[in-house]
Amino acid sequence: MRLAIFADVHGNSIALDAVLADVERHGSADAYLVLGDLTNVGPDPVGVLERLGRLDNARVVRGNGDRYVVTGELPNWFPAGKTDAQIAALRVELGASLGWTRGAVTVAGWYDWLAALPFDLRFTLPDGTRVLCVHATHRRDDEYILSPNRTDDELRALLADADAELVLAAHTHRPLDRTLGDRLRIVNPGCVSNPLPYLDDRRAGWSLLEAGPSGHSVASFLVDYDHEAVAAHAWRVRHPSADYIARLQRVPIAT
């Protein structure tokens, strides 16, 4: 059994194509585990959903961004140090971005599919390992706590009631693979798109889980893609957050 794992595609079909091609270069996969945040803050949400829909044996869980697109909710957190006026401006931009994505997804007929995504996914590997797939944590889809800067003891405590031996989670956009004692492991494949501004690496991340009756292994990979093309696509379709998308891709904004 070979399972390709990725997350946080964020409406970036160019990055997703690069990841899917890299999966094929590494011997393909029997199935795909997609850990949420598929469409928001990217220029091609429908293209992403169409590609996922064409994959054989893809299983997808909901991310907080998917929930925002479906419900119209806005995040309840904002960067520290912002004034009330700056927060108000951010809320306007977020609302416009999510509204644009919701409109595109709805017109293309994907709204109901996105709305029906499950919060989590559980299954058992051939060796008996219980797997939990979530976007952020087993409690919430927007809990930013399973990060690489946590100690082993902290991660073990946070996952104590997860009821699984292998936890596959995303949301932080930071790759993580940590074995916590004899029976617990957490893997975050990183992000396909929207790399964190304070990290140097812009490449898309994914992981490969290989499992059989005698055991399992996980390997993680990074692949580059055309960041300038992503920004150009955002400007071309007049995405309300096109400049923000370009900044995430580290592409200069024309003045």
Image (tube, helix red, strand yellow):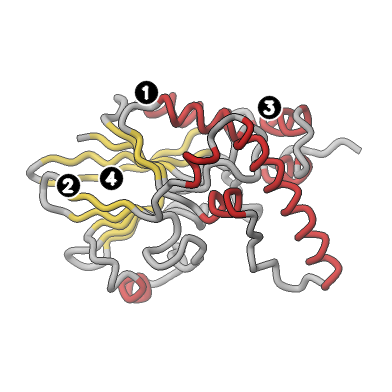
Residue at the extreme left? 214
Q: Earlier in the sequence, mark 2 or mark 1?
A: 1
Q: Amino acid at mark 2?
A: Leu
Where disc 3 sits, the SS reads helix
Residue 229, numbered label: 3
As displayed, is residue 10 above or below residue 121?
above
Give the Cα separation between the discs numbered 2 and 4.
Answer: 13 Å
Residue depicted at x 74% and y 29% = 232
Residue 218, numbered label: 4
- Crowding near the residue tagged with mark 1, few <14, some 14–19, many ≥20 C-alpha atoms within 10 Å: few
Give the Cα separation between the discs numbered 2 and 1.
Answer: 24 Å
Q: Nearer the viewer, mark 3 or mark 2?
A: 2
Q: Amino acid at mark 1?
A: Arg
Residue 115, numbered label: none
- Crowding near the residue tagged with mark 4, few <14, some 14–19, many ≥20 C-alpha atoms within 10 Å: some
Expressed as whole percent of the image width and height from the top left, the position of residue 18 reads: 50, 28
Q: Is residue 108 at all visible to an observer of this figure?
A: yes
Q: Is residue 224 at all visible to an observer of this figure?
A: no
Quarter of the rendering containing residue 238: top right
Give the Cα separation between the discs numbered 1 and 3.
Answer: 22 Å
Where disc 1 sits, the SS reads helix
Quadrant for the N terminus, please: top left
- Crowding near the residue tagged with mark 2, few <14, some 14–19, many ≥20 C-alpha atoms within 10 Å: some
From the viewer's side, name the closer residue of 51 and 166.
Answer: 51
Horizontal relation, residue 142 to residue 28: left or right: right
The residue that label 1 is drawn on is 25
